[in-house]
Amino acid sequence: MKLLRFLFRFAAIGLCAGAVLPAQSEWEYSLVSIEVTSKVYDAFQPWNDPTRAVRKHGLVIGPGEVLTTAQNLPTHTLVRLQKGGRGRWYDARVTWWDAQSNLALLTADSPAFWEGLQAASLAEAVSRGPDFELIRWRDGNLEERRVEFGQFTVGEGVLGFAPHVQMEVAADLSGLGWAEPIVREGRVLGLTTHSNGRVCGVLPAAFIRRVLAAHRAGTFTGLGYFDFTWQAGGNPELLKELGLEGPSRGGVVNRAGHVTDPEKAPQPRDIILAVDGFEVDSEGDYLDPDFGHLVLENLANRAHFAGDTVKLRLRRGAEERTIDYVVPKARFTDELVPREVFGTPPVYLVTGGLVFQPLTQPFLRGWGDEWRKYAPFRLQYYQYADAHDHRDSLVVLTGVLPDAINLGYQDADLSVLDRVNGRSIATLTDLAEALKTASPEGVHRFEFMRGHNLQRLLLDAATLDEATRRVVEHYGLPAAARF
Amino acid sequence: MKYLFGHAAGVETPSAVRARGWAMWLGALVLLGCAWGVTLRAEEAPPEQAVVQILTSSQVPDFASPWRFEPVMRSSGTGFVIAGRRILTNAHVIAWAKQILVRRYQDPRLLTARVVFAGHDCDLAVLELEEPAQLADVKPLQFGELPPVQSTVVTCGYPAGGDQMSFTRGVVSRIEVQPYAHAGNRALLAVQTDAAINPGNSGGPVFQGDKVVGVAFQGIPGLQNAGFFIPPEIVEHFLKDIADGHYDGFPQAGVTLEPLQNPAYRRVLGLVDDGRGARVDSLRFGGPAAQVLRPDDVLLQAGGYPVGSDGMIPYQSNRVAVGVAFQQPQAGEALRLSVFREGRTLEVDIKMEAYAGDRLAGRQYDEPPRYFIYAGLIFTPLSANYLETFGDPGRDYLWKGLAELTYQLYHLDTEAPGAVRPEPVVLSGILPHAVNADFALRGRVLVNRINGVRIERLEDVRRALLENHGARHLIEFNTPEHGMLEALDRAAASAAHAEILRIYGIVSDQRL
């Protein structure tokens, strides 16, 4: 009750603060530091759970509510908040996070934390600069630095692949991307998400407001995306070939999405003329009333969320038609090689010293920052492939813990499983099931996808469980499997 | 990654290298080499009289703009006179040569030579002087046997760092199958030595006594005191191959063997744990081995060599990969195998063949790339040489198009042999002109179909475009997005074709 009374009091303060905007010097009452300790995935020893701690920023945006980016939070073990850039750290809880929108909300249970804090205001209108301020805590002091507006663009988020509007700013600062707010005239224009040289990516306030409003209303179904691919309709000869005369315009669909019904989804060689009422130009862009020319992908989330219906006006052969396209939800699990795995600790299965894991992009990132150069090409290529033989996920042999039972297989790793004991393998659960029944010869038969160096290996079935126990003990594994 | 000694020296003439401050370091080796020398009987001519310096002016084509060549590059290597007044050297010393000059030992003259045979798979080449009589007074060198490990060898050649012949001495460190960097997709027997082998040594003889026991050819960056030479059996295989006037190349069986050391696997296949036999893991579709072998056959003997469970054979006091046995026959000859299958031992013969199916996946030399240009669109075969135009061999596969081309070239044949195109074709680039300026694609993409014709080889491109009588050409590309499209107005394209060639100074629109 005491906490509730305090929060009520805070709410009054917050509302008041929202009505009277904080002066620039008052950002210290809204901007807080966040310390996140999170688990780090060890690609080659997934049973290890090393942690790392990072510091980032958060904004008080309402009673008991701190807004930040979702980065580093999905695998957190401890989150703490600090106000004023110095002094005591307060335990905090993550009340909500969403990877695709890269947003998270935190709270702290200690009333003392909220004392003296006031809510910042997220700007409603879109501002194009030319100059903004970036605010951050640095060595216990509030730093306010000028940044230049670059452009609005549409791209995948840092954590997810759903396209949404983003802002680029240029700054002569290093070490940005830790949810530092970009502000102007007392209002927050966005939160930084990443930086590359001078260019810094920012989640615009308008996007944040929309997602938060839906979340609070209980209507946020997640971000969506267009699952078909298209190319700009800038070649008039191609448009003529497809039946469209006149000026270049639209986007030519070159690959259908998951829905094959032509009445519900665009088909290859359709020309997308308008999306949600916005005409598509020859670059594949539309004119956004808030952000200017943006690529049409943004219309999946501009006024919609996953599961909503978007009207697509198409040219299909000789006729024009409008279809109702249901925006699919952006889910990592829909990818053959998921680019992120959140929500569960890394899963693995060790049997007879053979270490199996799902093939994921986090595993490929185990080759370091330049993993796209150095991770095995064949494993990387699965990212670009369609679901394989109706499998929607893959299991890869990621290592061998040497033991008598796997003698001769020490170098047999980095191959994707095809079948075990004759059973098609898509998940570790499939693998565990397949291992319940050995072949009549008394062995377990592992077969790998064509194209890998090794096509198959056998393990003795009678001694497998004993060998697995031996491996678990010998190599200090907490368990032979984690699902 | 291995590097080559010789052609890789590029334009670095000895004087250029000296200018970079290497002179003192390599100079010391020269002095030591002279002191070591080669042991000779007093009445014999010193064998170095048969060792020549080869000065090559070469010009490599630009595989992305295939009608064009890179600037002329000068490089130097070494060779030596063999029987028949011929000179043996490395293929990489004379690859893409426009002019080959030979300088004899302590002879001021530059003698003009030509390539008679080049085996790029084994990195060997045979040259002849335009006037072979100029070698009449040279006693050809004789080949010896494979030198034993730990025995002493002496290299002889013209490495960077000076103009005179250089000798270095070392021991045979080990003998095993190594990738041959020149072709990029072949591995043959090679000898490692700690004798200094440097740029310019390539093609030079490695002596033991007065016999040649190898041809210096490559090293590995980062490894100190490790150079490699081609052993006598590879040289002899090459020389025997060309004896009929045609070079076939080293044969391949199309079989992947795996060690068979796991007790459970041996038990299932009916073998005791006696260290014998390697397992057939996979077979190349349509290859000679696929005619007589099956997966999980156990290879007990190959060409008379007992095959161990580690996939190795004993070979002249060494233990080398069983592939050495498969490389000994000439193309067309049979190799006798002893195979254990389902409890029985069988004797089977494989008729070995020189496999050319992976030609595009290895580096090609001496034949300029094929191409066809139409209305500014540059079509050329997908090849390893073409992919190398993308730069850094450790490539960033963020770009999906590159990933698709890599997969097509290196993986599709083993995973989906039925989908392989004999000569995949790429749109390499576009020569900008009003007729093609609206293309969203600018090249570097696989061509799937043109006007409905699936493109299996470059000739299909020409046929599909020139035999189309419709209003437009429709070109479908095979990208990860599965089918970007572009179209050209046929009449406008035909009308612009000659003008585009003129604007860009292209003499011929095709090399087919």
Image (spheres, rainbow, N blue to C red):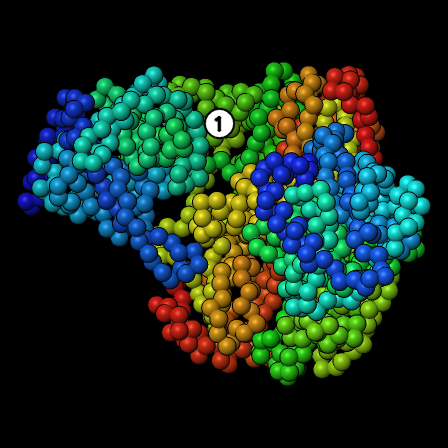
Query: Is the residue B188 above or below the residue B117 in the image?
Result: below
- Kindly tell me whether residue B239 is visible in this rendering: yes
Q: Quadrant of residue A213?
A: top left
Report the front residue among A372 and B189. Answer: B189
Q: Disc 1 marks which amino acid?
A: Leu
- Kindly tell me whether residue B8 is visible in this rendering: no
Q: Residue at x 49, y 32 (%)?
A: A324
Query: Is the residue B74 above or below the residue A296 in the image?
Result: below
Q: Which residue is drawn at 63% across and 39% down?
A: B17
Q: How many marks?
A: 1
Residue A342 placement (x, y as % from top left): 37, 50
Report the front residue among A13 and B174. Answer: B174
Residue B446 placement (x, y as % from top left): 68, 38
Report the front residue among B300 and B202. Answer: B202
A158 to the left or right of A81: right
Q: Residue at x 78, y 23 (%)?
A: B506
Q: Which residue is drawn at 65% across and 31% down?
A: B443
Residue A328 placement (x, y as % from top left): 46, 40
Residue B225 placement (x, y as % from top left): 59, 56
> Dot 1 corresponds to which residue?
A296
Q: Quadrant of residue A241?
A: top right
Pointer 1: residues within 10 angstroms few (<14), some, or many (20+)?
A: many
Q: In which quarter of the image is the C terminus of chain B?
A: top right
The chain ID associated with circle 1 is: A
B394 to the left or right of B131: left
Query: Is the residue B161 above or below the residue A20 in the image?
Result: below
Report the front residue among B63 and B218. Answer: B218
Q: In which quarter of the image is residue B261?
A: bottom right
A426 to the left or right of B101: left
Secondary structure beneath disc 1? helix
Going by the picture, which residue comes out furthest to the front? B42
